[in-house]
Image: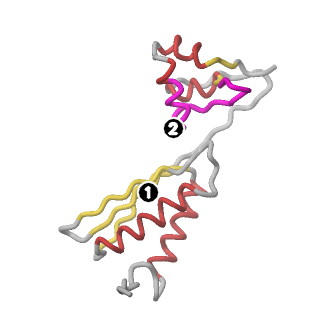
């Protein structure tokens, strides 16, 4: 037995949304969908995940649980240029090489007055750990990203 699939129009009707809004959710990854030809199909479990409802149990399939980790990394004594370099590295790493169905969500915040940077990471435990290992390597390297001087040539 297969899971029930909905068209974008059906999802829009069920949620009382405009079709463009549902397509926007799909493009941004907020709603998971499969493209078949020129149309999207949304699984009932993905619709349930969007609305926060408990997923319907499909006959013969075990329910798969997932875990999500939230981490906040605070780095003191960092200037704006180093914070920008570190932010670029973290965001690039988060956006490449991971499961696109469950992307890492990363936000960076820099406090100029305190010369403090915070990196907020939300996502799969393994991918989050990999990103934290990268941060650890960069921050603890003798000639790391934060210690590099920028020279005008």
Estimate the x, y position of residue 50 in percent, counting from the top left.
52, 28
In front: mark 1 or mark 2? 2
Residue ID for mark 1: 71
Precedes in sequence: disc 1 or disc 2: 2
Residue range in magenta is: 22-40
Q: In this view, does 118 lie above or below 9?
A: below
Residue ID for mark 2: 28
Q: In which quarter of the image is residue 111?
A: bottom left
Q: Which of 36 and 77 is in front in this view?
A: 36
Q: Quadrant of residue 96?
A: bottom right
| Residue count near mark 1 (Cα–Cα under 10 Å), binned few <14, some 14–19, many ≥20 | some
Estimate the x, y position of residue 98 in percent, counting from the top left.
62, 54
Q: Residue at x 73, y 26 (%)?
A: 37
Estimate the x, y position of residue 81 in percent, counting from the top left.
33, 73
- Looking at the image, residue 4 sits to the left or right of residue 140; the answer is right
The disc at residue 113 is: none
């Amino acid at each position: 037995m297969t899971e029930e699939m909905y068209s974008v129009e059906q999802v829009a009707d069920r949620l009382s949304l405009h079709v463009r809004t549902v397509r926007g959710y799909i493009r941004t990854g907020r709603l998971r969908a499969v493209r078949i030809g020129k149309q999207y199909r949304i699984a009932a479990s993905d619709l349930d995940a969007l609305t926060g409802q408990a997923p319907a149990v499909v006959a013969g399939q075990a329910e798969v649980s997932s875990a999500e980790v939230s981490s906040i990394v605070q780095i003191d004594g960092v200037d704006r240029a180093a914070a920008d370099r570190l932010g670029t590295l973290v965001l690039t790493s988060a956006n490449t090489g991971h499961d696109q169905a469950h992307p890492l969500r990363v936000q960076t915040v820099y406090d100029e007055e305190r010369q403090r940077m915070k990196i907020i990471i939300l996502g799969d435990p393994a991918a989050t750990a990999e990103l934290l290992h990268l941060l650890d390597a960069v921050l603890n390297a003798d000639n790391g990203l934060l210690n590099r001087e920028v020279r005008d040539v």
